Amino acid sequence: MGENKALPLLVVEDDPALQKQIKWSFDQYTVVTAGDRESALDQLRRHAPAVVTMDLGLPPDANSVSEGFKLLEQIMSAAPDTKVIVLTGQNDRANAIRAIGMGAYDFFAKPFEPELLNLMVDRAFRLYELQQENKRLQAMQAPDALSGLITRDPEMLRVCRIIEKVANTTATVMLLGESGTGKEILARGLHQASLRSSERFVAINCAAIPENLLESELFGYEKGAFTGAAKTTPGRIESANGGTLLLDEIGDIPISLQAKLLRFLQERVIERVGGRHEISVDVRIVCATHQDLKALTKSGQFREDLYYRLAEIVVNIPALRQRSGDAALLAHAFVRRFAQEQNRGSVSLSEEAVKAIEAHSWPGNVRELENCMKRAVIMAEGAQILPEDIGLEINVDGFDDNLDLHKVRDDAEKRAILAALARTNGNVVKSSKLLGVSRPTLYDMMHHFGLK
């Protein structure tokens, strides 16, 4: 059981003698102790224990179970994966069952037998490790539909999980993000991961079509509806029947059309321009915009009832500058792709170019980065791309202050690992040298943070 030494075991017990006995019984673990609820919560935040053993009778009223249940509730809220073993009196079965109902892993009657409690604690540790390993494996598995999306950023991976989760529902999804963040890629991924993947994915940019043509583009028109309408033509909504329709830049749809779109969303029927009969359409709606639709509703430019119809599931896509290590990671991928397209052989990014890429804020997001890498591959004189080929200068960004030292350390380590992996194009040997750690240590750290 030596492998558990690194995983902390928290013992919450107000009796000093019993606290020492329990600690002595678990010398194979890293044991931390607490005598009351506040100190237990401090130890929980500081050590993030995998397993907790706790007595329900805690100060200031050791004869009552109120403090114990309050602590159990707070542990389950702050760290729901923690395995809590409640130590109870011999005739305290009701409280034991209540504790299990609140999320405790198990209960054990006092006075305890060290060997049996040891077995229970060891089993709790093993279950915790299995569940954490399962979570790490799930986090590393990208959904097939989004396999073309390149990211290591935790927030962007969370967005991918949301897309995967809502794909097979009927909910209307709103994708919010700056221009160039990949809203259409995510919309296509949502379609491919859904039960509608065998049907059509149709996209329309509401900002790119003149207002007087947008209605006929969306809803279609009958022959003779207006000058030039030589034949009956289905609109984009009708063309997407059975599949998915992306309404890109939905914030630019004219107010005069919003009522007709709202009626379609409510009734799932359309009328072509110049038509007099309703047509039923079964289509999944996904919309995207870089605008603040809530602000537009307040100013009267966007109908509030339409907004709430479209915003059943809202997904906020982070900008490239907010995605740790992704700029360099994407840059390597773009260089490989464009070098092959332009027959440039084995062109690669120099270390100075990677630093310039990491330091740039990328206001145009992934689209800007893609264009820059294409230009750099074309303009590079030799086998390495230099900063001047990209046209960027190195700027040092500021550091956000944070007073939670445990979180600061974890965040800093994770950012450094992501940056090193991105800079070396995923080469673990080179990354370990950059970070100044051994390769096994880097693998352990990657494993800890759930990084592939």
Image: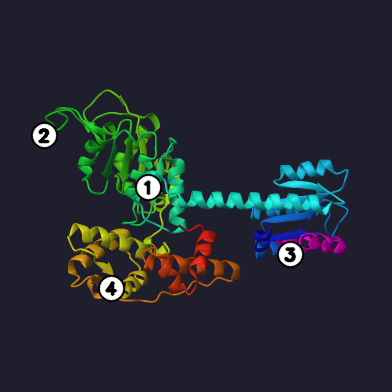
Q: Which residue is mark 4?
A: 392
Could you tell me which secondary element the residue under label 3 belongs to?
strand
Which one is closest to the eye, mark 1 or mark 3? 3
Residue 381: image x %, image y %?
18, 72
Is residue 30 highlighted in magenta?
yes
- Residue 351: x and y, percent? 33, 74
Task: Count residues near mark 4 (Cα–Cα under 10 Å), then give few for <14, some for 14-19, many for 20+.
Answer: some
Q: Amino acid at mark 4?
A: Leu
Q: CA distance from mark 1 to mark 4?
A: 30 Å
Q: Identity of the amino acid at label 1?
A: Leu
Q: Quadrant of residue 371?
A: bottom left
- Mark closer to the chain start, 3 or 2: 3
User: For the residue labelled by badge 1, is the local secondary structure a helix, a strand or a loop?
Assistant: helix
* Residue position for label 1: 146
Q: Give the number of the mark in front: 1 or 2.
A: 1
Assign the N terminus to one quadrant of the image. bottom right
SS at mark 2? Answer: loop
> Which of the two discs, 4 and 3, sits closer to the camera?
3
| Residue 29 horizontal side relative to residue 168, left or right | right
The stretch in magenta equals: 15-41
Q: Left or right: 368 with respect to 323?
A: left
* Mark 2, other Cα within 10 Å: few <14 / some 14–19 / many ≥20: few
Specify the amino acid type for callout 3: Val
What percent of the width, then of the height, locates residue 348?
27, 67
Specify which label sits upstream in the sequence, 4 or 2: 2
Say which element carries label 4.
loop
Disc number for residue 228: 2
Question: Of the residues under marks 4 and 3, which one precedes in the sequence?
Answer: 3
